[in-house]
Image (cartoon, rainbow, N blue to C red):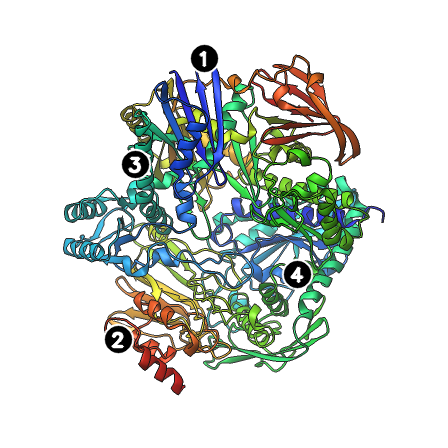
Amino acid sequence: MTQIVGVDVGGTFTDLVLFDAFEASVKIAKVLSTPENQAFGVMKALESAEATMKPIDTVIHGTTVTTNALLERKISRVGLITTQGFRDVLELGRRTRPKPYGMTGSFECIIPRELRLEVRERIDCDGEIVETLNEADVRQAVEQLLKSGVEAVIIHFLHSYKNDLHERMAEEIVQDLWPNRFITRGSALVSEYREYERGTTAAINAAIQPVLNHYIERLQQNLKEEGYSKDLLVMQGNGGTVSSNIVSKDAVKTVMSGPASGVMAAAYTASQSGFNRVVTYDMGGTSCDVGLIVNGIPQVTSELEIEYAMPIHVPMVDVHTIGAGGGSLSWVNEAGLLQVGPESAGAQPGPICYGRGGSKPTITDANLVLGRLNPATLLSVDNPVSIETVRNHLIEQVGVMLGLKDAEETASAIVRVANMNMAGALRLVSLARGYDPRDFTLFAFGGAGPLHAVALARELGIPKVLVPMRPGITNAVGCVVADVRHDYVNSINMPLAQADMDQVYEIFSTQILAGKKIIETEGVEIDELFFIHDVDMQFQGQTHILNFPVKETRVTQESLQSEFEKAYWNRFGVELPEILAVLVNLHTAVIGRRKPVPLKSLMSAEEQKNKIEECIIGNRRVWFETGWENTSIYKREKFPGQAKFNGPAIIEQLDTTIIVEPNNQVEVDLNGNLIISL
Amino acid sequence: MTNLDPITLTVIQSGLQQVCNEMDLSFVRSAFSPVISEALDRSDGIYAKEDGELISQGELGLPVFVGTMQFGTRCVIERAKDLHPGDVFIVNDPYLGGTHLMDVRFVKPFFYEGELFAWLANTGHWPDTGGAVPGGFSANATEVEQEGLRLPPVKLYKAGVMDEEILSIVLSNIRIADQRIGDIKAQAAALTVGEKRFTELIDRYGSDTVEGSIKELKKRSALQMRTKIKQIPDGLYHGEGFVDSDGVVNEPLRIEMKIRKEGTELYFDMSGSSPPCLGPMNSVIATTKSSVYLAIKHIFPEVPINAGTFEPLHIKDPEGTFLYAKYPRPVSGCAAEVSQRIAEAVFGALVKAIPDQLFAAPAGTSGNLCIGGFDPKRDRNYVMYVISGGGYGGNSSSDGLSNGCSTIGISKTTPVEVMEQYYPVLFEEYSLHEGSGGAGKQRGGFGVNYKIKLRRGNAKVSMVMDHGRFGPQGVLGGKDGGVNRVRIERHGETYIPPHLSKDQNVIVKEGDTIRVSTPGGGGYENPFLRNPELVKHDVQRGYYTTQQVKENFGVVLNFKGEIDEKATQKLRNEQ
């Protein structure tokens, strides 16, 4: 390997990081994203990093093309062929409403009703054929869909996870009448029961396939014109990468790949520094994303809902979004209580201090008034606003109503409430997944994450906070360090005592084999190949399942029983010897670890000083919960290779500001990360 | 009280909310009853030590419980003697601040530093509590004893130890008893979680501050609710709601809702409603009041729930009506059906006052259908529950949602693929109930059709639904939504229940089918004002036929499906 490039397209910026293994150097670029065609931004970033194509071995790309297409409904026209009597499953959903209270809301199915066609066929829950597929119906449906101008087709039959014969037969007919690349079989993508979730996942896949395909082809072309024709890898939502040549087939797997690469970078960076239980906390302008890393591996879920009634049931890094960001608005409600978020000023008009016309107080404005942010280095300022203006807005819109005496007191109230809300949400996220945040390290990134991280850690009893060397380009780093990963699942769904353990072994082995095979065909250079198995179990009669890892491919009933009981006790504090345990699903992730990347090279030696005292660039009054302190301001870029110092401190760097509270200790570790101990 | 600044108040408010949310989470993840774990038919909260007044309740609790749990807790407090840490009362008596028998409440005294500080309580819907019909929804019970086992408040746990004797009485009187031990432990463990977290909260902020904040927060919520009420013009507003029949006597029951708005207060008078009924469509007072609360919460969702929220809502006891049922009136339909009709009467009254913030009536039935029988292939008895959604009413800015959840619920339906795995049935259809959305400028959402075929053995079908006779009301000139229909094809004959969507123990055999079409939502404002393009679109999607839109929306489409502008104009002018 000589050079490897990670390039991540975000909502505002396209970030690029180029590692040169030979010279142990790194290049970084940050350019504005180009939503109309993200490829422009990517090429611009390469140009800005002064990259030459020849020595580059691999380009790994994180894109929001599919996520945006889906959320903005700029999707392809898709047709559905489904079991007679069930074409409305995708429109009806599972009888929900957007919020527990309020009897309004709307939902638009991504496949219009007139493009959802039915054919005669029926398979039952045991996989037995009740009614043979009527092939003439399929042919007629294809012709009708072709006439309506669809770009992609999904075939979605009941119980196809049990027996996919009819789906395969129908697929052949479709291929025959209309050879094209955009045919999605429901059970090929998700082989699990639940017709709405499986069908919706398939429908989303089909709706974004052509979009992704078009984009990737264009980008490949652009790269080729610049002289790069080696493989382009694309990030997926499970935190792994996949070759661009096959990425469109399972396009849905690229949704949410942005947040996933952030968590991947966190997992990699934190393990290099010796932390393998980590809560990731990425706070941006409108929201923050929270993920969990256990034993160095990001937690994965198959039950994500990307928006109301839009479930995507393929494995994805379990990232939970909380409605609190730098732009979150604060106001006083009718009860006279201070509220912060989830309403946000967004990027437009943004916080008051950004000078884009925002006039409502946000978390960022409060941080500014408290001396936690430096007005002189605030990014994104178009028309500078005086700090007096910000203070006045805070007093007038919030302070007066709460009977607070000045802007500082008002701002501190906003920050305290915001921290409390975020800490509460973070706590629930970890608890819901069965973990106690006190056993974790908080990994803070994103523009605003390091501003609040220490306060959240204090609230949650988290002992240490890790701030990586380059918090603002974490996702791009994630692209570079991501593994090649493929996930498999098969259902057993029977009491453990009756389960055939040879069959369990068989399934695990087959899943490993399938993963190995596909990684071979992708041809990506792999340092180490390994797999992770985990199982879903429940007590008979329950509907929720408990997931826990198993170490071996060959497992016994006794070991599963005791592991399950232990996991259940840890989670709920309940023992149930009266009830049978059921083995539900067997999961395998096959992971190819790529060659390690020297994170240390992210540090630039240019400005580096020998002593930490020399990194102090000034001081100012800063508010902490314990009171105001005259606080030293450090410049991160100047930090020596290793250092230790005590809070309070404000550490400023190009893309973020880090707050260190009084009594915290800061250590710069070998990889350039800051480890803040509370 | 030194520390009671507004920030501390906000912090304690969300702290209390966290305690409840964590109880909710623990309960739902470890429960066995799918009604709790999937349908989320449960609620957890903190209640005042003196009178059980609501302090805080989990945000994801079932809406119908917003007001009932404080009444239930009060009834326990009045009877409780000799309290110790670790005691847990079990109670499901509907007349003691409850709903129907299936909603089993656990109530636990919470001690801080040895002193009673508050009460923690939760409710969970058990799949069965005995009685004439599996599942408890007997459509023609005439006294509560036929509906199941009724428990007064008794200590199931004494100082942390389960009383095996009481447990054995409970388990001997209910169906599928072997799994209930799992629910009982989950329900009690959730309260233990709450105890732990609440203790941590008080440890951190001090008991004086927490106690003071609770009092202050109650005042603040009342203030917030009053600010909302203030925007309603003073006056008297009438609404009404109809229950098809009580399941025994085939006559409609009427809810008369008179709402008087005066300053910052709302006065609810339902005393003109029908007298108590013979069948199970009576409502106990706790459920009647809670239905009004939940209707208001649907209108002003941002007001947090605590006792203060209800302070400006004055509900006169509807003595002598079916909304104030007393022992031994049967009540199984109150939480699932009558409650929703009460809410609709509130919506129907207030839409006249603040039309922009309201909506036409939603489908408003839980759609409870239960099939119980024996599966010869698997050699076992089974009880299968189906719930269904329906259309929501149109509102000032959008059409109603299709297949929305019941007004009082937040539960999802079970997938067809899961039901077919567990029970000897085959679904032949799960589709949109065409034509059911009530016509309006903003139309109602659509209901659902489903058809179940029995594959093996014999079974009995029971159901308690509603809106079979009267569709959900349209408002401000909008039309009513489509009605609920049940049609059973058995032994080659069609059977339509005499009470339309209520019946009990209808015997079906292998090959017989049950088809249900659920109601659509009511329309909002005159349908002749609906944009013809949207009407055309509705026809394109197959929501309505050309004939239907001509009659109901005054839009004429030609054979190509295009709008005939002239004919449409003419028809609309004639109206």
Disc 1 element: loop
Please give the label number shown on residue A23: 1
- Is residue A1 something that shows in the picture? yes
In the image, are marks 1 and 3 on the same chain? yes
Q: Chain of mark 4?
A: B
Please check whether the numbered discs 1 and 4 fall on a single chain. no
Which residue carries the number 3 mark? A217
Where disc 3 sits, the SS reads: helix
- Amino acid carrying mark 2 in the image: Asn
Element at label 4: helix
Q: Residue A564: percent from the left, percent from the top?
A: 48, 33
- Name, please, the residue furthest toward the front: A383
Callout in the foreground (3, 2):
3
Question: Closer to the observer: label 4 or label 2?
Answer: 2
User: Is the residue marked by circle 1 packed among few (<14), some (14-19), or many (20+) residues within 10 Å?
Assistant: few
Q: Are marks 1 and 3 in contact (CB under 8 Å)?
A: no
Q: Amino acid at mark 1?
A: Glu
Mark closest to the chain's N terminus, 4 or 2: 4
Residue position for label 4: B72
Asked if labels 2 and 3 touch by Cβ distance under 8 angstroms, the answer is no
Q: Which residue is mark 2?
A: B558
> In front: B120, or A391?
A391
> Which numbered disc flags the more N-terminal residue, 1 or 3?
1
For the residues carrying marks 1 and 4, which lies nearer the camera in this image? 1
Residue B212: give x, y in percent of width and height.
Answer: 80, 51
- Dot 3: within a 10 Å radius of its alpha carbon, few (fewer than 14), some, or many (20 or more) residues? few
